[in-house]
Image (cartoon, grey):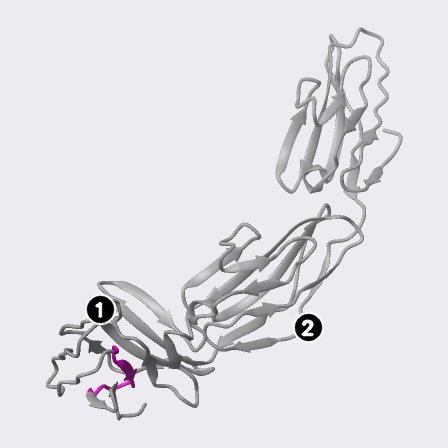
Amino acid sequence: MPQSSYSVSPGKTTTLECFVTSSLPLIGVYWKQKGRYGTITIEFTTNANKYSGTTTITPSLTIFNAGQRDVGTYTCFAMNGIGTGQSSTTALSISGSIPTVSVPQSSYSVSPGKTVTLECFVNSSLPLINVYWTRRGRYGTITIKFTTNANKYSGTTTITPSLTIFNAEQRDVGTYICFAENGVGTGQSLTTVLVVTGIYWQRNIGGDIKQITFSTNTNKYSGSTKTTPSLTIFNATQSDAGTYTCFAINSVGPGHSASTTLTVTGTYRSSGTLRTFSNDMEEVNENVLNDLILSCEMDLHVVDNTAACESFL
């Protein structure tokens, strides 16, 4: 074996040389690689897209598209009619270093329903192969890739490694780490923590839960803010009926009110004056539907054509 070690860049081709001297005809040649994934035998029939050589005519081993799986120690073996001889070992390493990954902030805070970007910076002397994030939170640990729910996330690519999260909610709370991979290996950032703080409401209709924040359809709702936590519903219809719960979140976690049920009952005519309501509310003779204001505990009554609640969080 003419060299005790070789170094190759990721994705490149290298040849480990082997010279054989035999007084008898050679029967066969093969190599063994011992690496992090165990010991493998490489023969001339082994994966022609990955290797060439290892024959009685060309005993040297050529490795295409070198990567981390190729790192290890190699030994060349040659057989004749008497037995098998072997070389000393030679080591193959991949030149370069893993990416350096950093996050500029140790924590982020975002209101429910808003968009937030967790920044990630990657420095690599070699082309990046992959970028992804992990989140560890109350619902376990998940991996976020560029293919993960495009309606919820963007970024996490080799060009844009930062992670953008749309419509922030309690499930997004947790500890995030950015990972970047090149031909040498995978680097990771320090952790950054995302907290979701603010006010939001949930409406439950037969198990179908909708989250309502201050940015949800401003033509339909208002409120759901820290200064005005109550929820106002404009142009109430049967589709607004359901069970409502008010949530308040801080850095410690969420709290919520008791649930209250909103029932929209009675009749309405687009022309005429008749409109009736249940829940012991007085009859209102108007041609418009009520606007409803829900607070975290409901005591429903009518004030100036508006059904309102007077209690507080």
Position of residue 270 relative to residue 95, above or below, is below
Q: Which residues are magenta?
A: 288-300
Q: Within the magenta stretch, is there residue 260? A: no
- Residue at (22%, 68%) from the top-left corner? 238
Position of residue 156 relative to residue 9, above or below, is below
- Residue at (49%, 65%) from the top-left corner? 136
Within-10-Å neighbours for mark 1: few <14, some 14–19, many 20+? few
Secondary structure type for disc 1: helix
Within-10-Å neighbours for mark 2: few <14, some 14–19, many 20+? few
On-image quarter of the N terminus: top right
Mark 2 or 1, nearer chain start: 2
Label 2 – label 1 distance at C-alpha: 48 Å
Measured from the top left, where is residue 261 in percent x and y? 20, 76
Please tell me the numbered disc located at residue 75: none
The amino acid at mark 2 is Pro
Measured from the top left, where is residue 29 in percent x and y? 74, 17
125 or 210, which is in the foreground? 210
Residue 280, by quadrant, is bottom left
Residue wearing tag 2: 104
